[in-house]
Image (tube, grey):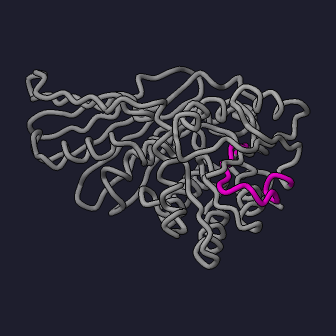
Amino acid sequence: MKLGVLGAGNISRSVAPAWLALPEIECYAVASQTPGKAEAFAKEYGFAKTYDSYEALAADPEVELVYVATPHSHHFEHMMLCLNHGKPVLCEKAFTMNAAQAKKIQAYAQTHGVFAGEAIWPRYMPSRAIIQKVLQSGIVGKIHTLTANLSYDIDHVRRIQDPALAGGALLDVGIYGLSFALTHFGWDIDRIGSSVQLTESGVDGMETITIFYRDGRMAVLTHGIYARSDRKGIFYGEKGYIVVENINNPQSVSVYNDRDELLEFYEVPQQVNGYEYEFAEAVRCIQEGKFQPDSISLEESVRTMEVMDSLRRDWGIVYPQERE
């Protein structure tokens, strides 16, 4: 399937080895609005064509799947550009800037039968099933609490600090903590509490989020842009606890009893870089005529955006475009 890439920045460079390793992907076209950037990217990763506008790539009749890797603030615009040209899209997280935009993408994809999916990579990985199997085994008894954290030293990155680019910790790294909790604890939520520290530019720099479930369970999440955290996800049960190394790209799952003795250890399957799973699934779903991925429905992407909208309302964060 001929791949077109919107945006030749850092995330596309991180993902690129997955495209080169997948026989079902042909690195066909890349577009960048920065002069010379698409050409350099194409030369490095073997793309056949380059464009200096996203419109030109979307209009290319040879493109069969578009990966949107532009800032959060432009995801909706760029996905709609592609969908209006009949192009299936796989868009980086966070899916859109807010839930209203996500609902429009969902409605268009479903009505017109054009594939659209959120590229939040842990949802597609084999580690997801491994974690679920351990949770369902009952090895640590009834699980009452989940904690997860994800923080990086990224406050110096311009888009992270810029409200106009939908910056802040939540849409960039916080979505991983939320997705981890929602994937493994589900959606039967009673209420959500939170606290936040804003940056001078008015976006969220650090936050804690507590999800209270109707059955009494809690998920406590911490995210930030100032320092690298241990990135662990931990499930606490009556007879022990389960540790997931790196919720962003799980590497292993360790099970301990209530005396801190290791009971079981699971390594995830060897991977290219972890991004290959979402692209392999996108290709398969497009070939099967589906309008959304199996691993994360558009409804789930919408509901996740609704949670983040609610958090931002509590924090008083409104992006400039939302005031227009």
Left or right of residue 205: residue 217: left
Q: At 52% from the left edge and 55% from the top edge, which residue is drawn?
A: 282
Image quadrant containing the C terminus: bottom right
Quarter of the figure with residue 12? top right
Left or right of residue 38: residue 135: left
- Residue 263 lies, in percent from the top left, at 10, 27
Depth order, front residue of 135/24:
24
Q: At 86% from the left edge and 44% from the top edge, which residue is drawn?
A: 51
Eyeballing the image, is 123 above or below 20?
below
Residue 66 in magenta stretch: yes
- Residue 85 lies, in percent from the top left, at 76, 66
- Residue 103 lies, in percent from the top left, at 61, 69
The residue lying furthest to the right in this view is 35
Q: At 61% from the left edge and 55% from the top edge, which residue is drawn?
A: 313
Left or right of residue 106: residue 264: left
The residue lying furthest to the bottom in this view is 111
Eyeballing the image, is 73 above or below 109?
above
Left or right of residue 121: residue 72: right
Marks counted in the figure total 0
Residue 122 in magenta stretch: no
Q: At 43% from the left edge and 33% from the top edge, which residue is drawn?
A: 249
Depth order, front residue of 137/146:
137
Eyeballing the image, is 72 above or below 34?
below
Depth order, front residue of 155/65:
65
Eyeballing the image, is 173 above or below 300?
above
Q: Which residues are magenta?
A: 56-71
- Residue 83 lies, in percent from the top left, at 71, 65
